[in-house]
């Protein structure tokens, strides 16, 4: 079997959650291991529901320090102290976010022999910064446009690539990072006609479609969705489709997207 990337959606919501969507988080799995992208609350529970073990994580990458992306870190550290014999946990993030991690861990008194040593590694805020380069995956980052230090991420194994925009306004750096990716998970604050409500921090479905089209990706997944997204699902997809001819779907919690040399399939329980 050739190389593959599998994206597990731990949470697909923006900061205000709903009965069916929790805050943003992804687990991206290669043939060798899993990377946690952002850390929502209850992350150990979310991983377990998808058949993934928190103590088997190879690393954590935090895209930025907004509360909905990092508030699960203290619980992850705590849970690993209870249920795993880990010597260290590597966390990659912009330095601004690492400062928040240090403050949270200090507030919960999670330094010391009971806890895994936190290996905090800053991600450079430059286009195409290399975060990780292992035998199975190359992870690179570029600055997103979100009002604070935020990074978009590209996971590459062989000729396969998955890109996650994180929270962002339309960004040429994100578009470049996503070039010819098989899968782009892009921020979607809502419909373009409601743009004034989120124009400082997020993208509309139309703008996500434009980025996907310009980047020549194969598939677009709209994510970081607001509480109206399920009611507006068909309209959001249609709006993105006006600018992008590839496959489009809304992310849902516990979806799994798989890209490999032999298959490119989406398992999302038949939803839009």
Image (cartoon, rainbow, N blue to C red):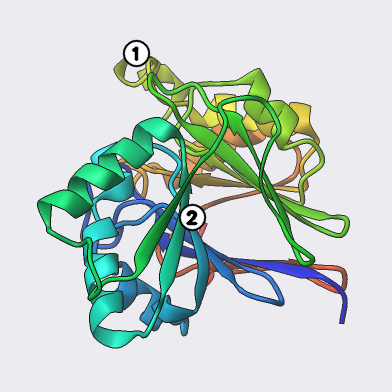
Position of the N terminus by quadrant: bottom right
In the picture of the structure, the residue carrying the numbered disc 1 is: 196
Which residue is situated farthest in the front direction here?
113
Q: Position of residue 140 (x, y in %)?
A: 67, 42
Q: What residue is at 49 percent from the left and 21 percent from the top?
A: 145
Left or right relative to 209: residue 10: left
Q: Position of residue 177 (x, y in %)?
A: 71, 34
Total labels: the figure holds: 2
Circle 1/circle 2 CB separation < 8 Å: no
Helix, strand, or loop for circle 2?
Answer: loop
Q: Position of residue 6 (x, y in %)?
A: 64, 68
N-term-proximal mark, 1 vs 2: 1
- Distance in Å between CA atoms under marks 1 and 2: 23 Å
Relative height, residue 263 to residue 83 (above, below): above
Q: Give 158 or 13, whichever is nearer the viewer.
A: 158
Q: Give 16 or 167, whichever is nearer the viewer.
A: 167
Q: Give 18 or 142, whichever is nearer the viewer.
A: 142
Characterize the local packing of mark 1: few (<14), some (14-19) or many (20 or more) Cα atoms within 10 angstroms.
few
Q: What residue is at 86 percent from the left and 60 percent from the top?
A: 158
Helix, strand, or loop for circle 1?
Answer: helix
In the picture of the structure, the residue carrying the numbered disc 2 is: 251
Q: Is residue 267 visible?
A: yes
């Amino acid at each position: 079997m050739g190389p593959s990337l599998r994206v597990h959606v731990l949470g697909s919501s923006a900061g205000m959650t709903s009965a069916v969507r929790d805050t943003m988080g992804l687990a991206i799995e290669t043939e060798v291991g899993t990377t946690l992208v952002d850390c929502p609350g209850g992350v150990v529970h979310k991983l377990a529901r998808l058949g993934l073990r928190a103590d088997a994580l190879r690393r954590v990458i935090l895209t930025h320090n907004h509360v909905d992306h990092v508030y699960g870190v203290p619980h992850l550290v705590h849970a690993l102290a209870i249920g795993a014999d880990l010597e260290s946990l590597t966390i990659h993030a912009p330095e601004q976010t690492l400062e928040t991690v240090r403050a949270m861990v200090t507030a919960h008194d999670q330094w010391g022999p009971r806890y895994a040593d936190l290996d905090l590694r800053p991600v450079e805020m430059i286009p195409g910064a290399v975060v990780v380069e292992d035998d199975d995956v190359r992870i690179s980052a570029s600055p997103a446009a979100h009002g604070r230090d935020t990074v978009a991420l590209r996971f590459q194994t062989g000729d396969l690539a998955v890109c996650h925009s994180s929270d962002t306004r339309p960004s040429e750096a994100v578009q470049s990072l996503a070039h010819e990716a098989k899968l782009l998970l892009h921020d979607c604050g809502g419909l373009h006609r409601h743009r004034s409500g989120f124009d400082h921090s997020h993208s509309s479905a139309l703008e996500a479609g434009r980025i996907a089209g310009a980047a020549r990706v194969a598939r677009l997944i709209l994510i970081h969705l607001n509480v109206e997204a399920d009611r507006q699902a068909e309209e959001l997809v249609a709006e993105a489709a006006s600018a992008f001819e590839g496959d489009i779907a809304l992310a849902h919690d516990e979806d799994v997207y798989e890209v490999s040399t032999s298959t490119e399939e989406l398992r999302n329980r038949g939803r839009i």
